[in-house]
């Protein structure tokens, strides 16, 4: 075999599997080998399931040999963020408090992956309970950006983004509460899509903030994201917020890749000052490519977006403080007995366990959330935030009256250095300034690579936003832009990333 299977897209691999030029076992093994070669330096995975993945690959190969009708991605391996419950596989959410917990059930999304014949390679690293923008809040150590190992791969889903960007898997699952699919995609030169809220079941997704959380695809191409979206999407009676409608026609839109006649809205509030020059330059060029492709561009005003970050950091901690109350030392994972107490009460065990089991960022948000929800402050903080949330949704509604999709840079900067923002929570929170409005309004969003910044040679991302349930527009615009950019670059951006298996530079000696 001359081609390196790990460099191909999921769509290309699915084709080779369908025509039986390769087997899923061969393909899965190639990715496990790649992980063995590079994950020592990237640290994308918290758990690699070699035996399980190969068993699933063998099973799908047998079904194919028997002539069974298989789904479009059958046999293509995938990595899953460690926030999704996986039956028989550890699920830690990047936290000590869940160390050793093995769920007795699969999340709906995971069940769909298994039924569609996608071997699960393992569980990817993440900021603890998905709180963060860098994976530095993982209790198990950070993941590294394949473009520069001293830099962050984004967060909270930096394990998934770095696994995709370092060719350890063609596909991964992320979750996006305030940007954790899109921002990691932007800083690693990959594609990330957050479906409409309710478009993919949250059953078995360990909740951070239930009104914001949404799982979705992490891939290297827009078409791959569409194929994965259509596998995991759709109604689920086990999730009361799941949309009872068919998955939007995302695959067809990705294949058509057409923007002619569409109106693209550039959001005035998401750009300009505070955004790195190289991020802005690549964004402007991308917008021009959309115009060249036949789209019309307008500027749209969304004044309430200026309050999105503040609103999010009241609503998210409030919901998180409530969701995390279930980690009480009785039900899941770790139990710590308080030292020097003979006959500890349940409350004392709970306190000792939560003190030892949760990291600083999680504690910070629990304190913020319980404060914002407490009597006397509820109306002043949580109640106000809910009202501003409505204003943000109204801004989207007005903007979508004049534009089919909205665009902005995904993140204000390229990947920062590991350690750079760890002691400054506000600086960390600012990474999501452009992605958070979509979660507050429940609308779908996608990030795809727009190029490399001139200052530092690191990937930049462009974000596309669409009205709720119109996810197909993300894919139409995203794949049209991707096509134009590939032509400009003369090949995939990730071809320019460093070779991680090359011998270490001499400075290490
Ligand atoms: N970085 C944001 C936060 O820390 C978003 C996290 C997410 O989307 N899970 O809350």
Image (cartoon, helix red, strand yellow):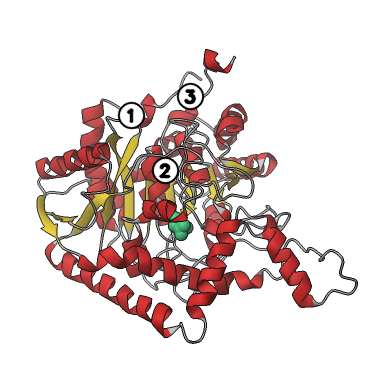
User: Whole-Å distance between the Cαs marked 2 and 1?
Assistant: 21 Å
Residue that appears at 52% across and 18% down: 502
Question: Label 2's element?
Answer: strand
- Kind of element beneath mark 3: loop
Question: Is 200 in front, or is 45?
Answer: 45
Q: Can the viewer see residue 170? A: no
128 left or right of 397? right
Pointer 3 local density, CA inside 10 Å: few below 14, some 14–19, many at least 20? few
Figure check: 288 above or below 495: below
Image coordinates for residue 408, horizontal then vertical, percent: 24, 51
Above-or-below relation of 340 to 411: below
* Residue 179 x, y percent position in the rendering: 40, 55
The residue located at (68%, 53%) in the rendering is 90
Q: In the rendered image, which quarter is residue 246 located in?
A: bottom left
Answer left or right for 129 relative to 90. Answer: left
| Mark 2 or 1, closer to the camera | 1
């Amino acid at each position: 075999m001359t081609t390196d299977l790990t460099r191909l897209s999921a769509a290309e691999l699915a084709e080779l599997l369908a025509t039986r030029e390769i087997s899923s076992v061969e393909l899965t093994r190639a990715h496990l080998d790649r992980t063995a070669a590079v994950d020592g330096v990237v640290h994308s995975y918290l758990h690699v399931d070699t035996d399980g993945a190969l068993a699933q690959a063998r099973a799908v190969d047998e079904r194919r040999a028997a002539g069974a009708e298989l789904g479009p991605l059958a046999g293509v391996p995938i990595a899953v963020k460690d926030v999704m419950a996986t039956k028989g596989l550890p699920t830690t959410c990047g936290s000590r408090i869940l160390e050793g917990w093995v769920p007795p059930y699969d999340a709906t999304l995971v069940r769909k992956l298994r039924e569609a014949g996608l071997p699960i390679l393992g569980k990817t690293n993440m900021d603890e309970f998905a709180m963060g923008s860098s994976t530095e809040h993982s209790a198990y150590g950070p993941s590294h950006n394949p473009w520069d190992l001293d830099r962050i791969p984004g967060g909270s889903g930096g394990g998934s983004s770095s696994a995709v960007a370092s060719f350890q898997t063609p596909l991964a699952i992320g979750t996006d509460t305030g940007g954790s699919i899109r921002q990691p995609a932007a800083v690693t030169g990959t594609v990330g899509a957050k479906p409409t809220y309710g478009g993919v079941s949250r059953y078995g997704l360990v909740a951070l903030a239930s009104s914001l959380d949404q799982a979705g695809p992490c891939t290297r191409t827009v078409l791959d994201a569409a194929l994965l979206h259509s596998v995991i999407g759709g109604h689920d009676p086990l999730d009361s917020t799941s949309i009872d409608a068919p998955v939007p026609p995302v695959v067809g839109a990705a294949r058509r890749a057409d923007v002619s006649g569409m109106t693209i809205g550039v959001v005035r509030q998401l750009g300009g000052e505070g955004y790195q020059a190289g991020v802005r330059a690549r964004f402007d060029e991308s917008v021009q490519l959309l115009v060249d492709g036949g789209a019309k561009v307008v500027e749209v005003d969304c004044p309430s977006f200026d309050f999105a970050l503040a609103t999010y950091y009241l609503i998210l901690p409030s919901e998180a403080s409530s969701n995390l109350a279930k980690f009480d030392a009785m039900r899941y994972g770790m139990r710590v007995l308080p030292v020097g107490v003979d006959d500890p009460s349940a409350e004392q065990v709970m306190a000792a366990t939560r003190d030892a089991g949760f990291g600083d960022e999680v504690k910070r948000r629990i304190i913020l959330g319980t404060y914002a929800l407490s009597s006397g402050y509820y109306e002043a903080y949580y109640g106000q935030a809910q009202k501003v949330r409505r204003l943000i949704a109204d801004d989207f509604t007005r903007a979508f009256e004049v534009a089919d999709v909205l665009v902005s840079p995904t993140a204000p900067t390229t990947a920062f250095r590991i350690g750079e923002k760890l002691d400054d929570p506000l600086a960390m929170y600012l990474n999501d300034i452009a992605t958070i409005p979509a979660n507050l309004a429940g609308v779908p969003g996608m990030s795809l690579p727009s190029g490399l910044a001139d200052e530092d040679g690191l990937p930049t991302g462009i974000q596309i936003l669409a009205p709720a349930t119109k996810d197909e527009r993300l894919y139409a615009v995203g794949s049209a832009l991707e096509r134009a950019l590939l032509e400009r670059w003369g090949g995939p951006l990730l071809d320019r990333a460093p070779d991680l298996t090359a011998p270490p530079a001499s400075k290490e000696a």
